[in-house]
Image (cartoon, helix red, strand yellow):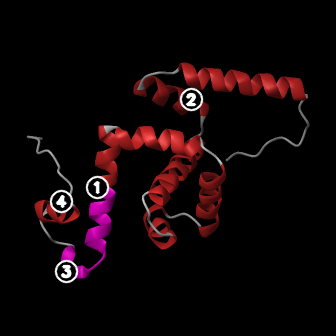
Amino acid sequence: MSRVSKKVLNRQIEEQMFETLWESVSQVKNKEDVKLFLGDLLSPVERIMVAKRLAIAVMLLKGHNYETIIDILRVSNETISKIALALRLNRGYKIAIDKIIRSEAGRQFWQDIENLLYRMSSPGKVFLPDEVVTYRLGHNKKKTLL
């Protein structure tokens, strides 16, 4: 993330800033508004960093090992370790991830990641039809016309 100024902020002002941030985030309810808000609030690099941290947490909770996470997300061992520690000691990631995994978009995204990992596990699996991979992984994808 961006560097923070070394100038010490008044404690009361800092607390009020965080209260405003927490309140602002809690008031943004729909996906498009969240996208706009975070798009304005975070730089492109900060958005990528936050998204990768969340993806690391999800992958750890789904049982993926460090090597797999490093290969897919292009992150360091140290970054994964920090997220793993936060998962063990805190509840914030788990609250958000539970909601993500329950959503249809979240389920579909992680099924696609699992399909990719399955295909990468052996050269012979790369060109298997989607239906075969889906069946072997136990995913019940609904077919769409698109």
Q: Are marks 4 and 3 in contact (CB under 8 Å)?
A: no
Within the magenta stretch, is there residue 18? no
Q: Secondary structure at mark 2?
A: helix
What crowding class fits label 4: few (fewer than 14 Cα within 10 Å), some (14-19), or many (20 or more)?
some
Q: Residue at x 70, y 21 (%)?
A: 20
Image check: 131 left or right of 108?
A: left
What's the amino acid at mark 2?
Asp
> Which label sits on residue 124?
3
What's the amino acid at mark 3?
Gly
Residue 4 sits above or below residue 25 on the image: below
Separation of residues labelled 4 and 1 (CA atoms): 9 Å
The answer to which image quadrant residue 15 occupies is top right
Frontmost residue, 114 versus 38: 114
Q: In the rendered image, which residue does mark 1 sit on?
A: 112
Looking at the image, tell me whether mark 4 or mark 3 is earlier in sequence order: 3
> Which label sits on residue 40?
2
Image check: 17 left or right of 65?
A: right
Q: Which residues are magenta?
A: 112-125
Q: Residue at x 91, y 38 (%)?
A: 7
